Amino acid sequence: MQYQSFIGLEVHIHLLTKTKVFCGCRSAFGDEPNTNVCPVCLGYPGVLPSLNIEAMRMGCMVARALNCRIPEKTWFERKQYFYPDMTKNYQISQFACPLGQEGYVDIESKQDLADGTALGKAGHSSGMAFKKRVRIKECHLEEDAGKMIHTGSVSLLDYNRAGVSLLEIVTEPDMETGEEAERFIQQLRRTVRYLGVCDGNMEEGSLRADANVSINFPGKGLGRKVEIKNLNSSRFVRLGLNYEIQRQGEMLDAGKTVVQETRLWNENRDETMPMRTKENAQDYRYFPEPDLPVFSPDAAFLKSVEESLVELPVSRAKRFEKDLGLNGEQADLVCEEKASADYFEAALSAAVSAGLEPKDAALRIVNWLLQDIKHILSREGIPLHDIGSFKLNPKRLAALVALVGGGQISVKIAKQTLEAVLAEDKDPEVIIKERGWERLSDPAKIAEIVQAVYKAEEAAFAEAREAAAGGNGKRRQTLTAFLVGKVLAASSGRADPKIAGAQIEALIH
Ligand code: ADP
Ligand code: ZN
Ligand code: MG
């Protein structure tokens, strides 16, 4: 039986504020446990929280990037629960009027995803790509809880994370497959990294997702939802959801009903397991946080939010495709990080200033980026988001590209030059000049090399002449190319292949 499936995500992101959301403690991952704490985040009685405006600003940036409405007034509530990771016994969160409301994002989906390949690799899947709108229910700002570390019979608590700024993004149940959810998370991750408000590191828990999924008979609306927790990679989101859709389908096929519950993803067994049943919505007894005033964003605040927004990865990639002729896969890869997209555009504008035509320059730069540069970055252990620190800066790449484009050097020399630029931290023009690597286009000088090749390759010349006489044009061409290659090799790639070719042709006839 074919069922309809519904997926809604709740994604938590750690905002990159220097301090926590309601106190001045340092907000950092990996510090000595319980060193970034104070009476406020430890929940001592009688202390007063105060809102970190940076957290509110970053939260609103995400809300705007997700096309949410920022209300005229927004406030905080206390969400009561009793758990050792939350010493106050309540979490300050937002409930009735979150900072971002009713937005949407468009994700790219594919109809046929049977092969289960990552959607990030555009073009690898056979299905038709189409746009899918995922509505965002809300974005709300809250404080994170402490971290529990269970070791054998004891549990340890680290409160460094307690009070760290957390933004929760809740979608409507508009996705249908694990692949769509994976795509949503990848796109959201890129977006928050572009905005500079979250590092998006799922392994360290700076971006965490809970996935809700239900299935039902077609046309019957939402089913009874199961929530999957503990998904610390976008791949697990995909696997966990697809496993659940399958499991729930088998239950309905067998005439059983799905129990509303919370399940955990077990990454060692590739399956979800029951954690707790949630019959009714938990009663958190929300009430407005009396120690924090209502926040009414003023014009200056909203202006600073709008000014911090950057062109988002999806539209940037689309622009590169439309205006510069990159294909979908190239544009997607170039826009993987804001730093790489910035690098690409800086190199492009320098190459255009040097006289190249924009589309031609774009294609040349992309080829360098996705081949040689990518290879060197991984060889040198430079992550793509650090490409800004690469010794071949955009100006130097543009110089190389312009020199190749203008015929002053060959691609082979350009590659050699690139390595020398890295080794000596000098501009390509300087390296080329110092080493005498400019293209050799003086016919007399090339003729000397051609003569040497003529002597060394007598047999090849004879055969070419024979082929020419016998009307075997193909063979003659092959041999000419071979001889031009010899001239290039003898000149360390410097000789102009056109001039060398013409001289060889003249010797054959
Ligand atoms: P709860 O009160 O249990 O937290 P919410 O209404 O706040 O539930 O929704 C939490 C998430 O679950 C949202 O992302 C929402 O889209 C999703 N969701 C809600 N109901 C369903 C359902 N029946 N099937 C799939 N997802 C659902
Ligand atoms: Zn503190
Ligand atoms: Mg909820």
Image: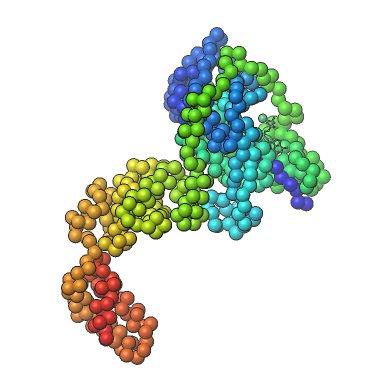
Q: In which quarter of the image is residue 505?
A: bottom left
Q: Quadrant of residue 458?
A: bottom left
Front residue of 151/135: it is 135
Front residue of 320/172: it is 320
In this rendering, would 479 be left or right of 383? Answer: left
**Residue drawn at (17%, 71%), measured in percent from left and top?**
445
Residue 477, can we see it? Answer: yes
Instruction: Give residue 154's position: percent from left, percent from top.
Output: 55, 24
Instruction: Give residue 111's position: percent from left, percent from top.
Output: 65, 54
Residue 150, can we see it? Answer: no
Residue sitting farthest toward the right: 255
In this rendering, would 283 be left or right of 21? Answer: right
**In the picture shown, does residue 97 fall above or below 261?**
above
Residue sitting farthest toward the front: 299
**Residue drawn at (24%, 48%), measured in percent from left and top?**
426
- Quadrant of the frame with the C terminus: bottom left
**Residue drawn at (44%, 25%), measured in percent from left and top?**
18
In this rendering, would 11 be left or right of 509? Answer: right
Q: In which quarter of the image is residue 227?
A: top right
Instruction: Give residue 247's position: percent from left, percent from top.
Output: 71, 45
Front residue of 506/126: it is 506
